[in-house]
Amino acid sequence: TCIMNRNNLCYNHRFVTSTISSHSGSPNIPASLEKLRLDGYLSSKNIAHASNDFGNIYHHLPSAVLYPKSVSDISSTIKHIFDMGSTSDLTVAARGHAHSLQGQAQAHQGVVINMESLKQEMYFHKGEFPYVDVSGGELWINILHESLKHGLAPKSWTDYLHLTVGGTLSNAGVSGQAFRHGPQISNVYRLEVVTGRGELITCSESQNADLFYGVLGGLGQFGIITRARISLEPAPLMVKWIRVLYSDFSTFTEDQEHLISSEDTFDYLEGLVIKNRTGLLNNWRSSFNPKDPVQASQFNSDGKTLFCLEIGKYFNPEETAKVNQKIDRLLSDLSYIQSTLFLSEVSYAEFLDRVHTSELKLREKGLWDVHHPWLNLQIPKSRIHEFAEVVFGKIITDSSTGPILIYPVNASKWNNKTSMVTPHEEIFYLVAFLSSAIPYSTGKDGLAHILNQNKRIIDFCETALLGMKQYVPHYTTQEAWQTHFGAQWDVFVRRKSQYDPLAILAPGQRIFQKAR
Ligand code: FAD
C-alpha cells in the first residue's frame, strides 16, 4: 500500500523541519469542506490553542478546528477528506484534553477535532457487570463524579483525571490499580469508532474485534473513538493512603513485587525515586501523619537516594477496624525503614483526584504551563536493577525537576491483542520521569539539560539492550517505530491500510505520512 512504500527520508525531513515550528500554517481548507452541513461548526479563527499541548515543546498550527456536536459531524468531515483522496494533503487529529507531550494531538495545516465539544449523555448500566457508556471526549474526572452518584466507579485509572477517554485509551491508561485490573484498555467492553474512511463502526471482543483491539493502545491511528463502554465496580468511600521509605533498591522492589503477586493485598501500589531532597518527611506532613512522630523527625533525607513505596487500601467507614488490622498484617511483611511510615485517610474521590490538587498549587505559582520534557518507560523486571544502578545512580543527580515514578505491573493483566506493546516478561516496571523545565533556565532545571538527560537514559537502555519499551511513545523515524512495535509492526501496518488507508488520522504521532 501507499503507507508501506513511502520514502522514509522525505517523511522525516518534513516533520523535522516543522517541529518546534513558528505558527505559520496557511489555511488550506477546501471550500467544499467548509460547506459541509454540520451540527457543530468548523472554524479557522482563534485556533492557536490547537497548536499546543501539555509538553509545550512542539507547535503545529492546523488550518481549522472542528467543534463537533454530533458523531456525524466527525464521520462526514473525515469521509469528505477521504473522498478527496490523494488530491488533498489534509490530515485530521482528534484533540482530547491535549495532554500529549510531543504534539501527538496536533495536525500541521490539517483539521483538529475538539473532542470535548462532542457532548453525549453518560448511560449507566447496573447489574452483575455494571458499565457506563461515555463520549470519547469525556474527561475521566466527570466520569468519576457521575459514577459515584450511582455508587459505582471505573476500576483502572490514570494518576491525573483531567484527560479524555479517547486520549488515554489510545495509549493504555495506567496507575496504581493496573497491577490488579490491568490498564484502562483492559477494562473496556465496547467502542464506537469513526475510521479513516469516515465509517462509524461499533466494535468489541465479539464484533469487529480486529478494529476493537487495534484502536486500544492504537495511538489514534485506526479511528476516532466517539463512544466507549467502560467497566465499573462498586465504589469504596474512603482510602487509607500510605507512604514508606527504603534506602535499598532491591528491598524496595522485592516488597513491591511481593505485594503485586497476591490477591490479598493493597488496592493501589506505586513508587517514587527521591534523590538529594532536603526535608522530605517534613513536606509529607501537610497531607500525611507519621506513625511515630519522634522517630520520623530524626530521619534525614539529605543527600540520599531513597525509594518511596506508595500504597492505598480502599474501605468503607464501617470496616475501619477490619481494614486497619489487614493493613497492619500486610505492612508487617515489608522491610521499609520503620521510622518513615506515614499514613493518611481521604475520600476515594479526593484520592483519585490528588494530582489536580498539585496542579492548582502549581498554577498559582505560574509553574503549570511550562515545558514538560517527560519520559515514560517500561523496563522488564530482569533488567530493572541494571537500569536503576546506571540511571538513578549515575545519570540522575537529583529528583528536583519533578517526580520519578517506578512501579511493577503484571503483563498477564494486559491483553496482547491490543496495539499497546509491552516488554516480553510477566512483570515489568513502569518508570516515569515527570520533569518540568524552569522557563529560560540554562541550568540543570532547564529544558535543554532535561532533554539531554532523557536522551542519555534512552541511549543507555538501547545500548544495553534492556528490552525497554517507551510508554506514550515518541519516535521520529519509521524505522524507530518499527523497532518499537517489533513483531506487532506487521499487524499495525495491516490495520492502518485497512482502517485508515490514506493515513489521514493522528499525524502528530509521526508514524505514517498522508498519501499524496
Ligand atoms: P490528547 O493529548 O488530546 O491525545 C492523545 C492522542 O490520542 C493523540 O494522538 C490524539 O489524536 C489521540 N486521540 C485523542 N482523542 C482521541 C479519540 N477520541 N479517539 C482516537 N484518538 C484520540 N497516562 C497514564 O497512562 N497514566 C497516568 O497516570 C498519566 N498521567 C498523566 C498526567 C498528566 C499531567 C499528563 C499531562 C499526562 C498523563 N498521562 C498519563 C499521559 C496521558 O494518558 C496521555 O498523554 C493521554 O493521551 C492524554 O489524554 P488527552 O485526552 O489529553 O489526549
Image (tube, rainbow, N blue to C red):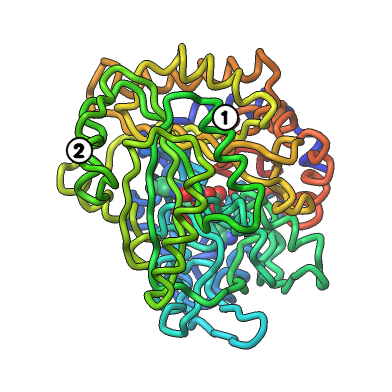
Residue at (61%, 62%) from the top-left corner? 224
Report the front residue among 214 and 456. Answer: 456
Drawn side of residue 111 relative to residue 25, left or right: right
Q: Determine the secondary structure under disc 2.
A: helix
Any atom of ligand 1 within 8 Å of the CB at mark 1? Answer: no
Residue at (30%, 29%) from the top-left corner? 437
Q: Amino acid at mark 1?
A: Arg
Q: Determine the secondary structure under disc 1.
A: helix
The image quadrant where one finds the N terminus is top right
Select label 2 or label 1 by which is in front. 2
Is residue 93 visible in the rendered structure shown here?
Answer: no
Q: Which label belongs to residue 413?
A: none
Q: Amino acid at mark 2?
A: Val
Q: Quadrant of residue 514?
A: top right
Q: Residues within 10 Å of mark 1 (few under 14, many from 20)?
A: few
Q: Which label belongs to residue 14?
A: 1
Horizontal and vertical percent position of residue 386: 61, 18
Q: Is residue 470 above or below residue 116?
A: above
Horizontal and vertical percent position of residue 278: 22, 25
Drawn side of residue 472 relative to residue 281, left or right: right
Distance Cα–Cα, label 2 vs label 1? 61 Å
Query: Is tag 2's residue or tag 1's residue first in the polypeptide sequence?
Result: 1
Q: Is residue 185 above or below residue 2?
A: below
Can you identify the residue that label 2 sits on?
A: 294
